[in-house]
Image (tube, grey):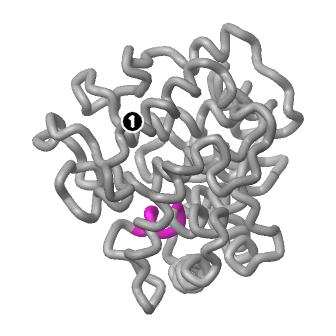
Amino acid sequence: MDAAIGFVVAKGDQVDRARLSYLRTGAAPSEEIRDKAEAGQSRDGGWPAYWADGVASVDATCFRLAELDDLGALGRQPARRALDWLTTRQHADGSWEEDSSLADIAPPWAVPGDPEARLYITANAAFWLTVAGQDARSAGPLDDRPGGAYAGVVVKAAEALRTEVQPDGTMPTFLVATWLSAAVLYRHDMFYESVRLQQRLIERLPELTAADAAWLAAANRRVGVRDDDPLIINAMLRLRQLQRSDGGFTSDDGDAFDVHTTLAAIRACR
């Protein structure tokens, strides 16, 4: 942990260091830092991805919510607008997908109309609505219903995800959707399906990258999976194997994102 902290301090920008401070001590960042992290929001409430030509993206909005969560900013107006926007984007069957106008430019994990991408986008949106709905900082008085402030939306999403869990603990989608779905189902007391997903994820952990192991652990710990759960223990062991001598963790998206991956690892370990 100390080495990872040193890496972020040495390589991160102001927002990165503010995220680190919040993760370590709960220290509130300055208004300037929060404004910087919230910049670029579309009028409708979402954030566009770099590939989305200005159109608000579910995937990009979830990525931004993760950064804002690290700043304790899920209760601020920009995050609440984004969460409300996500609820308006849900389909009648409980799923989400990107805007159809993005079909020709979206990366494989976000292509509208693709079943695998739809499951990933659904798991990601359901995860952040679950987290924010249960968080007193964002929802006001803590709401104990599954999904909290967004109960109706996320219960429908959780049911949609549960139907896609196969008997062998796989899902017909990208692996990242599996650990996000495991977290959502766990938080909604759908333990039978969540455990099946967890068991398969433990089998896959030895092949996961640092970015994936950190994301898996951080997401599941964020919804209350215990530190002594086999999934978390094995994810921590994998992260220990993958930490570099400089304290950082290697991103799957190039050196520019190593600090982001290292912050995810710190989030998973705190």
* Picture layout, residue 149 above or below residue 126: above
Which residue reaches farthest top? 32
Nearer the observer, 244 or 25: 25
Task: Determine the image quadrant of residue 60.
Answer: top left
Q: Position of residue 217 (x, y in %)?
A: 66, 62
Residue placed under numbered mark 1 in the picture: 88
Q: Position of residue 127 (x, y in %)?
A: 55, 52
* Picture layout, residue 141 above or below residue 195: above
SS at mark 1 in the image: helix
Q: Is residue 177 magenta?
A: yes
Q: Is residue 160 left or right of residue 6?
A: left
Nearer the observer, 261 or 34: 34
Q: Is residue 213 magenta?
A: no
Q: Position of residue 112 (x, y in %)?
A: 20, 49
Q: Residue at x 85, y 26 (%)?
A: 27
Q: Residue at x 64, y 78 (%)?
A: 191
* Picture layout, residue 162 above or below residue 26: below
Crowd around label 1: few <14 · some 14–19 · many ≥20 (10 Å): few
Stretch of the chain drawn in magenta: 175-180
Q: Position of residue 80 (x, y in %)?
A: 58, 27
Which residue reaches farthest bottom? 167
Q: Residue at x 25, y 31 (%)?
A: 52
Residue type, numbered disc 1: Thr
Task: Determine the image quadrant of residue 16.
Answer: top right
Q: Is residue 10 left or right of residue 254?
A: right
Which residue reaches farthest right? 25
Q: Is residue 62 left or right of residue 150?
A: left
The answer to whether any part of residue 239 appears in the image is yes
* Picture layout, residue 149 above or below residue 212: above
Q: Main secondary structure of the magenta part?
A: helix
The answer to whether any part of residue 245 appears in the image is no
